[in-house]
Amino acid sequence: MSAPAEPKRAGAPSLRDLRALTQARIALGAHGAGLPTRAALAFGLDHARAREAVWTPLDAGAIREALRAEGLDSVELRANVADRAEYLRRPDRGRTLHPESEEALGGLGQGFDVAVVIADGLSATAVALNAVPTAAALAARVAQAGWSLAPVAVVQQGRVAIGDPIGARLKARCVVVLIGERPGLSASDSLGCYITCAPEPGLPDSRRNCISNIRQDGLAVEAAADQMEALLRAMMAQGTSGVGLRRESLAGPQAILPEA
C-alpha cells in the first residue's frame, strides 16, 4: 500500500512560481492533447528567432562603423567558406582564413599583447547586439593595463578557432574571440568569448577559456570584461591558457577567474 501524498506546505513555491526566475520552458500547462495557444505561439516565435540568428548575414560594415565610433580600428576578414550553407556543413572551413584575408593581415603589424576577433558564429543577432559594447569595454581595460591592442578583426563565417591563425599572424600574446553562440529556444542573442594564450593554428579547444551568455538577460558586458581582464592577466603571468591555467588569486577587483 503506497504512502499518502505529502500535503503541500503553506507558502512553498510551486513550479509555476519559478517561471518568473527563468527563461526555460517550464509549467506551460496543457490544452487538450497539446499546449495552450500562448505557449505554442511563443515556441513558434522563438524558433523563428533562432533560425533568423543562424541565417542572417553579419553586417560587417555596421560593426566596423560602430567600432570606429568607439575609437577602435578594425579590419574586415572572411573565413575560407563559400556561403552560409557550406559554413553549416563544413565547420572545418570556418576555422581557416581565406587567402585574401591572410594577405590583409600582413599590413597590420605584429607583436601585440592582445588581438580581438569578432566573428558571426551561429548568431549574427548576438554579434549585432553585444559584440561592439563588449569589445569596447575590453579595449578600455587593455589600455588601462598598458597592453597593446591589434586592430579588431571582423570575420565573416568564422568559427571559434579562426582566432588562432589571426593571432599567430599578428604574433599576439593572447587572442580574444567574441562570437555568436548557438541559439536555443530561450535565447538567440547570446555572445560567447574564447581566450587563447600563444595562439597558433591547430590548437585543441582544451587550450581555450570560455565566458558564455554575454547579453542583456545574461552576463552583463562590464562583468564579462572584468572576467576577460582577469583571464588575460593570469595567462600573461603563467604563459598558458585553457585547462593548464592555474586559478590562483589575483590582486584587484578582477581576482575571480571564470570556469573554463
Image (spheres, grey):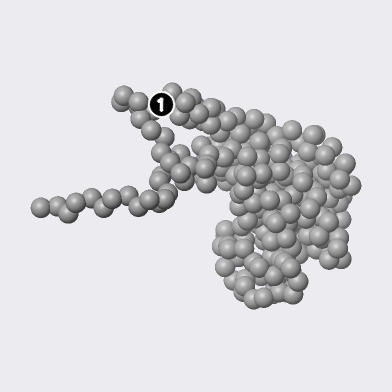
Q: Position of residue 69 (x, y in %)?
A: 88, 41
Residue at x 62% of width, y 44% of height? 217
Q: Badge 1: how crowded within 10 Å, few (<14), some, or many (20+)? A: few
Under mark 1, the amino acid is Pro
Between 28 and 107, the one nearer to me in the picture:
28
Q: Position of residue 204 (x, y in %)?
A: 57, 60
Residue at x 55% of width, y 37% of height? 88
Up/down of 32 relative to 244, above or below: above
Between 95 and 2, the one nearer to me in the picture:
2
Up/down of 165 relative to 20, above or below: below
Residue at x 40% of width, y 46% of height? 14
**Element at badge 1?**
loop
Q: Name the residue under label 1.
A: 36
Residue at x 47% of width, y 26% of height? 38
Between 122 and 219, the one nearer to me in the picture:
219
Residue 161 visible in the picture: no
Q: Where is residue 176 in the image (x, y as percent from the top left)?
A: 71, 55
Instruction: Locate residue 22 relative to residue 10 in the image: left or right.
Output: right
Q: Position of residue 193 (x, y in %)?
A: 66, 53
Residue 195 visible in the picture: yes
Between 235 and 125, the one nearer to me in the picture:
125
